[in-house]
Image (cartoon, rainbow, N blue to C red):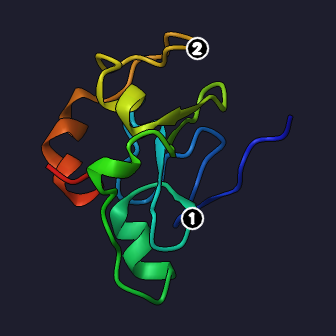
Amino acid sequence: MSRPSVFGLDLDGETRCRHWHSPRDIVALRLPCCGRYYACRDCHDALAGHPARVWPRAAFDQPAALCGACGHEMSAAVYLACADRCPACAAPFNPGCRLHRHLYFEG
């Protein structure tokens, strides 16, 4: 199975972008407004050409996050409960991303 495409500015092979590029910034998020994975909300806002929408709670079972290390897709519910590690490969995710969840997911 091939990895979904990820969009962003200055992407590397693990989905880090111009805005977020620490070793743990390896999660791309799919936005429900366009169904595309973006490295971050800033990349979406720069490239998508439309306003971003957040995932409604009723759709938390839909694929919404992608591990940049292994390509594992996670639903919003799985991603939000993953304790900052990929459930498939255990790659560590940036715990600071929790501060920005309101940009992607309904509270």
Q: Is residue 27 left or right of residue 56?
A: right
Q: Residue at x 60, y 27 (%)?
A: 69
Q: Which mark is drawn over residue 72?
A: none
Does 50 appear above or below 81? below
Image quadrant in which you'd find residue 5: bottom right
Q: CA distance from mark 1 to mark 2?
A: 22 Å
Q: Is residue 79 above or below residue 105?
A: above
Outermost residue, bottom side: 49
64 is higher (above) or lower (below) than 25: below
The 10 Å Cα crowd at callout 2, few under 14, some 14 to 19, many 20 or more, is few
Residue 99 is left or right of residue 41, and the answer is left
- Marks 1 and 2 close (CB-CB < 8 Å): no
**Residue 7: percent from the left, percent from the top?**
59, 63
Q: Closer to us: mark 1 or mark 2?
A: 1
For label 2, the residue is 88
Q: Amino acid type of disc 1?
A: Gly
Q: Say if 66 sits above or below 23 in the image.
A: below
Q: Is residue 30 left or right of residue 24?
A: right
Disc 2 marks a residue whose amino acid type is Ala
Looking at the image, is mark 1 or mark 2 earlier in the sequence? 1
SS type, badge 1: loop
Image quadrant assignment for residue 10 = bottom right
* Disc ID at residue 35: 1
Nearer-the-camera pick, 18 or 7: 7
Q: Residue 11: image x %, image y %?
A: 58, 55
Q: Residue at x 66, y 42 (%)?
A: 13
Position in image of residue 51 (x %, y %): 35, 83
